[in-house]
Amino acid sequence: MIRGSVLLAAVVAAALLAASAGAQGKPGLGCPPGFDIGETTYAEFLGLSRTQAAIAVGLVTVGDTLAGLAGIDKNGDGSVCVQLPTGFETNSRPFGEYFYNIADNNASKPD
């Protein structure tokens, strides 16, 4: 459970690095540049390979992951932006192979 908390804290910390704005009920404005996986629902996030691997080895549970996503999803629309960060596998050992960078889909500002 401690490893799951560490991973969840790392996911939340990475998401906080991305600018997020908005309040409950506001529509999403899309993903910031560089979020290569793009806008992803909670269910889709649970199906991503790194998420599945973290759950399979017991680092996090489905409930931990959903709670973390809900904390990031400031506009409450059930979607977040996901980026596959490069270098995390080697620079953030031993848990980097499970990381995604996550931001609310309201992080972009309209032109």
Image (cartoon, rainbow, N blue to C red):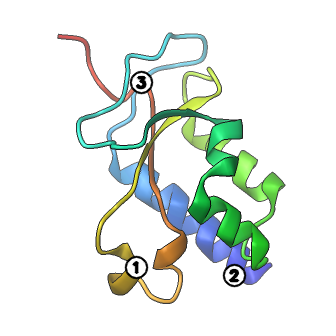
Q: Is disc 2 in contact with disc 1, using a CB cutoff of under 8 Å?
A: no
Q: Nearer the viewer, residue 32 or 48?
A: 48
Q: Residue at x 60, y 71 (%)?
A: 7
Q: Return the mark for residue 89.
A: 1
Gap between marks 2 and 1 measured at Cα: 16 Å
Compare marks 3 and 2 and give the one earlier in the sequence: 2
Q: Quarter-wise, where is residue 42 in the image?
A: top right
Sequence-first disc among 2 and 1: 2
Compared to residue 6, the image places residue 63 above or below, namely above
Q: CA distance from mark 1 to mark 3?
A: 27 Å
Q: Amino acid at mark 2?
A: Arg
Position in image of residue 74 (x %, y %): 55, 29
Kind of residue indicated by mark 3? Asn
Where is 64 relative to 74, above or below? below
Q: Position of residue 62 (x, y in %)?
A: 80, 55
Q: Which residue in the structure is indicated by mark 2?
A: 3
* Mark positioned earlier in the residue sequence (1 or 3): 1
Q: Which residue sits furthest left?
A: 111
On screen, residue 11 above or below 26: below
